[in-house]
Image (cartoon, grey):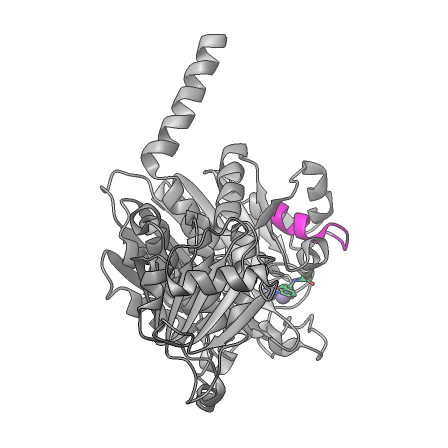
Amino acid sequence: MNFELKTLDLAGAAALKCDALVVLVTANFKPGADALSNQVALALKADDLQSKPGKLLVLYRPMGTQCVRAVLVGAGEGTAKQVRQALVAAMGTLRSGAAGEKKLVVCFASNASAQAVQVAVSTLAEASYLYTTTKPKAAADAVTLGRVTLGVPLAASVKPAFTQAVATVAGVEMAKEWANRPANHATPTLLAQAARSLSRLPKITCEVLGPKEVAKLGMGSFMAVAQGSEQPLRFIVLTYSGAAKAQAPTVLVGKGITFDTGGISIKPAAEMDEMKYDMGGAASVLGVFRALAELKPAINVVGLIPTCENMPGGRALKPGDVVTSMSGQTIEVLNTDAEGRLILCDALTYAERFKPRAVVDIATLTGACVVALGHVRSGLFSASDELAKQLLAAGEASMDLCWRMPLDDEYAEGLKSNFADVANIGGRMGGAITAAKFLQRFAGKFDWAHLDVAGTAWKSGAAKGATGRPVGLLLEFLLANPIAKSAAKPRTKKANLVAKT
Ligand code: BES
Ligand code: MN
Ligand code: ZN
């Protein structure tokens, strides 16, 4: 899909030739002197149209316009949520298949905030997204928009938000593509190829390590998870260099289990197919890099993706096995289904070499997080109040929400082992937190946050599929907190401390 942003009033929108013209009508709508404004005003007066979000009226070739159909839709006070509601309703009226709308104009009849524009772009992209890789015929009866023109009263004021939103869509769609692909079309090798293809984009490099290199690094924990599979593991290192070398990078670590059977601690059959999205964290890292290449911000970012399958088999890891992580800590594997933390811990140790300003790992880590937070907010864990604040704010701004969870040391009690430095599970209760406490042991050398996206990276049910989350959150976090700003903060804090003591 192709987006463009234009300064348009209703008269201007009416003059554009298009298949469908969507007019977002807010409560404070003030009609101009043009024919379309007049129609909207009359419809409102007759109560055939209301500004209530999602209420709509469809007109066929209305006089004085160049569109085939006009969809007048209520958008409440024009808040981001209401705009999303309005556009979901409007998109529901569009026709699919060969006769469907190709050129769409969406016009904000009155004010359009930056966040409303952002949400308009993401909602339109979401509504017309289609997975076709292993179902090419799906395209025949889908709404396939070619070109979308967003008309706002003043394009210049919302241009940066628009540009970020369009880049986010590219990243979200890449993340969805890879998370949606079945595991036989998204092996660790194929995922690494996808990462490699990103290095053709500006400012991005990609290095892919295989079993030999990973063994040499001493990633015994990661290797142990991979050993049950015929598919060789890959360790992907992406870099985006938008700033001077001296600027410490933010490191993103994505869990890349391309299929999670549970291993010897095998999962039940029902819905096991969905475990193809256990590389949703990895997919979101790829998506962020895709978007960075488009926006070219002056920051440095490293992406680390440990990727393998978690399979049972003659060579597979067994409950009770003790493995040695790259950090030197030994781990007793009491449940082979708690494999995400086993591959992430070695990636976290590897992250130390970048002397990062912060490390954020993204993982479909626990079913317990889905129980705790459902599908609305991702679980956020961090011992750093500053980092947590930045990520929470980025979630709100991008409408890709998260919620901070605790990290009290008492939650680590259950991870004690008689046979190793730590066990990989800590009892049934508070499972999302004990998983985070496990990771925290490997993140002592930098500011760290963990996002558990088990509930948010995927939708179950009839509309089953990947969501592309948390690409929007991560991108907003990276763009809103460039190094100069965040480096200044700890320094002032320290200065304050010194002054006080
Ligand atoms: N990939 C799963 C977590 C998961 C569950 C993601 C449901 C998405 C939806 C993870 O590897 C896992 O199996 N976790 C176990 C941990 C347990 C054995 C301590 C879980 O959540 O049951
Ligand atoms: Mn598992
Ligand atoms: Zn898993």
Residue 8 visible in the shown view: yes
The one nearer the camera, 83 or 489, is 83
Magenta range: 427-437
Quadrant of the image occupied by residue 120: bottom left
The N terminus sits in image quarter: bottom left
Residue 287 at x, y percent in the picture:
40, 62
Residue 23 at x, y percent in the picture:
45, 63
- Look at the image and say whether residue 58 sits in the magenta stretch: no
The residue shown at (44%, 86%) is 139
Q: Main secondary structure of the magenta part?
A: helix
The one nearer the camera, 482 or 186, is 482
- Count all numbered tags in the image, as a single digit: 0
Asked if residue 216 is positioned above or below residue 487 in the image, the reply reads below
Residue 278 visible in the shown view: no
The residue shown at (65%, 68%) is 318
Residue 161 at x, y percent in the picture:
37, 50
Drawn side of residue 425 relative to residue 140, left or right = right
The one nearer the camera, 329 or 171, is 171
Drawn side of residue 186 relative to residue 51, left or right = left
Residue 354 at x, y percent in the picture:
35, 45
The residue shown at (53%, 46%) is 396
Asked if residue 411 is positioned above or below residue 151 in the image, the reply reads above
Drawn side of residue 161 relative to residue 369, left or right = left
Drawn side of residue 276 relative to residue 296, left or right = right
- Look at the image and say whether residue 433 sits in the magenta stretch: yes
View quadrant of ligand 3? bottom right
The one nearer the camera, 37 or 324, is 37
The residue shown at (53%, 76%) is 93
Asked if residue 248 is positioned above or below residue 450 in the image, the reply reads above
